[in-house]
Amino acid sequence: MPDAALRLKSLFEQLLGTPVPVRIRAWDGSEAGPPGAPALVLRNRRALRRLLWKPGELGLARAWVAGDLGVEGDLYAALEVMAGLVWERGEGAKGLREALRDPGVRAAVRGLVRMGGPPLPPAPPREEVRRRRHLHTKRSDRRAISHHYDVGNDFYEIVLGPSMVYSCAYWEEAGTLEEAQRDKLDLVCRKLALKPGLRLLDVGCGWGSMAIHAAREYGVFVVGVTLSQEQAAYARKRVADEGLTDRVEIRVQDYRDVTDGPYDAISSIGMAEHVGADRYLEYARVLHALLKPGGRLLNHQIARRPQMDESAYSVDEFIDAYVFPDGELAPLGTTVMQLERAGFEVRDVEALREHYALTLRRWVANLEAQWVRAIRLTSPGRARVWRLYMAASALAFERNRIGVNQVLAVRTPEPGTSGLPLRARTWNPGT
C-alpha cells in the first residue's frame, strides 16, 4: 500500500517539531494531512532532494520552478503556511545546522535522505541565474534587466493587460486594472505639475505607458530610457501608433549616460529597485544634475522594512536567482536620506502598499486565466516563476513585510522657493 505521504508527514513533523498544516501528496499517489487544507504535491523524489540539498526558500523555489513540487488548492493560503514551514527552524541551511544538534531532527533528516533516493544534488532549473560578483556596472545591469524584461512582450501583455504598466496601480476610484493604472500615471503627472511644452525624462520607461500618457494628456516632450531592447521596440511602436513621434523619444540607454539635460521633471517608476545600495547616491546625484532648478522628481519605489542590524540584511534568494538579479530593496528612510544627500528637498511621501497587493492579485489572475498560452510563449518554468513571485509578493504587501512609496522631491533653487503650492496634496497641474 502506498505510504510515502504518511512517512513524509511524520518525518516533517519530527523535523519541525509541529504538526504540518498542509496536506502532502507524494509521488506514489498517497496523501496525508488535514482535510480541506491546501495540498503540497511532491511529484517525484527529486523534489525532496532539492529541499534537502538547499533547505529553505531557494530549495522550495527550485522544486517549484522545475515542476517537481506543486500546490493544489488556494495558492495564497499554501504560500502562507509554506513560509511558516521554511522559517519554523530558522533561515535555510543555517537554521537546519542549528536544528541538527537535536537527535530527533538528525533522525528525521536521515529518514528523508533515504526517501529521496540517490544522494546527488539535482541541477538547478535553467531559468535560474547566478549572482555576479561585480554588481551594478553598466554591463551587469544590462544583463540583469534583459533577464527580467526580455521574456517576451506577448507574455507581458497576458500578465499586465492592455495598460502594459509594470508597477503598482492606484485603486482610489478605479474598477478595472486598466483604469487603476491610468489613474496612477495621472497621479504621477499631477505631482510633477506637467503642462504643455515641458520636458520630462522617464527613467526605466518600460513599454512606454508613462511617456505616452504624459505626452498625450499633458502635452509634454518626453525622453524615455530603458536597458531592454524588447521594451524599447514595443514602446516605439506604441508611440508611432499614437501619433506621438514628435513628442516622445524612446532610447535604449543607461540613465547614467543621459547628457541632454536639463529636464523640467523626471519620473522613475519601479526602476530604482534595480540601482543597488552601493549605487543609490550616484543615482540620486545623476537625476538631480539632470533637473532644472525647481524641477521635480517622482520616485516610485518598493521598500523593505528596516532591520535592527542593517548589516545582516541579505537579498531574497528566490527573487535574486529567478526574478530580479542584483535587485535590492532599501528602507524608505534610507531612500529619503540618499535623495536629500544628493541635494533634493523631499516634499511628499505617499505609501501605496495596499494598492500593490491589489495590483499583483490582478496580474496573477491574468496569468492563470491564460496559463496554457503563457507557457507556450515562454516556458513552463518561467510561467511558474512569475506566478510564484507575484502571488508571494501580494502576500508580502498585504502582511506589511514590504511597502511601496511615491517620493516627490524638488531641486529647490536659491533662495529656497520650491514652487509647490502650500497645500501640495491638491496636485493641481501647473501650480
Image: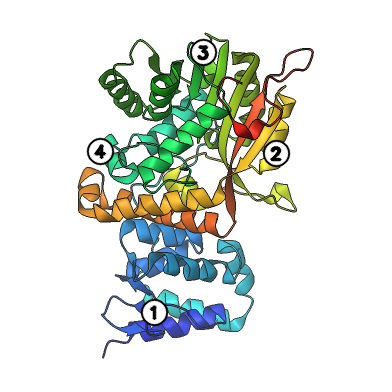
The three-letter code of the residue at mark 2 reads Thr
Task: Report crowding for label 1: few under 14, some 14 to 19, many 20 or more residues within 10 A (C-alpha).
Answer: many
Q: Which mark is residue 198?
A: 3
- Please report whichever mark, 3 or 1, sits nearer to the chain's N-terminal start: 1
Q: Are marks 4 and 2 in contact (CB under 8 Å)?
A: no
The label nearer to you, 4 versus 1, is: 4
The label nearer to you, 4 versus 3, is: 3
Q: Which mark is residue 23?
A: 1
Q: Marks 4/1: CA distance?
A: 36 Å
> Please, which colouring scheme is shown?
rainbow
Task: Report crowding for label 3: few under 14, some 14 to 19, many 20 or more residues within 10 A (C-alpha).
Answer: some
The three-letter code of the residue at mark 1 reads Arg
* Secondary structure state at the residue bearing disc 2: helix
- Image quarter where the C terminus lies is top right
Instruction: Please say if 320 is above or below 283.
Output: below
Residue 244 at x, y percent in the picture: 33, 16
The label nearer to you, 3 versus 2, is: 3
- Please report whichever mark, 4 or 1, sits nearer to the chain's N-terminal start: 1
Q: Would you name the residue on which mark 2 appears?
A: 334
Query: Residue at 24% across / 50% down in the picture?
Result: 375
* Secondary structure state at the residue bearing disc 3: loop
Q: Would you name the residue on which mark 4 appears?
A: 154
